[in-house]
Image (cartoon, rainbow, N blue to C red):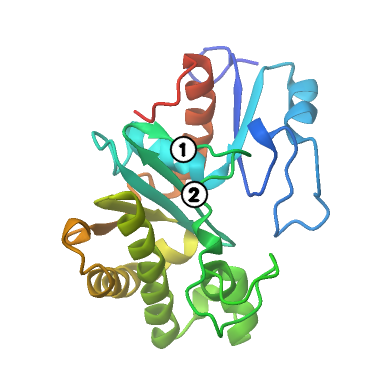
Amino acid sequence: MLSATGAAPVALGVGCGGPMTPGGATVSPLNIPAWRGFPLRDRLSAHTGLPTWVDNDAKALALGEGWAGAAQGCDNYLAMVVSTGVGGGIVLDGRLLDGAGSNAGHIGHVVVDPLGHVCPCGTRGCLEAECSGTAIARLTGRPAAEASHEVRVRTGRLVGRAVASVVSLLDLRLAVVAGSVALGYGDVFFDAAQAELDRCTQIEFARGATIVPGGLGADGPLVGAAAVARRALAGSGTAG
């Protein structure tokens, strides 16, 4: 099949919710209960006839934002998705972190409220249990897009708290945040997130870290998926 530009596709990149096994051989996204150990990579490769690479959707976003978005030219940053779920990808010294099982960067399971709600992962007070679109709908009884001003502020504040832990741990200066909840809540969310980040980063090297909206907008997931394949074809972990 030819694309709109007349070029034939040579590979398929996929961003998917996690956790997953190394290389995305099987995926078990928490918000898709029917997929547990699902062989997504092999199924897609068999269906399309293309070499296929699967990675966490937020790690894919990190690659995309470094390639063509708000993190261009930056060698150290966190990228986040705050949407149906909450995920993250970390670029350190110009390379995307994978971890032992390709699950590095899962900021959605940083605990931001030890007395908070139970997360699908089984822990109490995870960022995902408090700030994902699914959690907000469950806790408020209305779609996340209809959340009150107070809920939007709280969501931003807790995201900023989680980001503070990551930037302090890894000596980062930039967090790029995308996803329907974050981008949909706009300035209310980002102002609250930045204020909490500033409050929680008092150690000198972490001061001045910033949270900015993703630069790819609604195209972030597609650009990120393309970046997964681009990275694999290049045989490199680099994010640019």
Quadrant position of residue 41: top right
The numbered disc on residue 44 is none
Where disc 2 sits, the SS reads: loop
Mark 2 Cα shell of 10 Å, populated few (<14), some (14-19), many (≥20): many
Mark 1 Cα shell of 10 Å, populated few (<14), some (14-19), many (≥20): some
* Residue at 47%, 15% in the rendered image: 234
Residue 158, compared with residue 214, is above or below; it is: below
Q: In the rendered image, which residue does mark 1 sit on?
A: 97
Residue 35, compared with residue 33, is above or below; it is: above
* Residue at 36%, 76% in the rendered image: 157
Q: In the rendered image, which residue does mark 2 sit on?
A: 105
Say what amino acid the circle numbered 2 marks: Gly
Quadrant position of residue 125: bottom right
Where disc 1 sits, the SS reads: loop
Task: Please state the horizontal and vertical placement of residue 32, each as a whole percent of the image.
Answer: 75, 56
Do labels 1 and 2 touch, CB within 8 Å?
yes
- The C terminus, quarter of image: top left
- The N terminus, quarter of image: top right
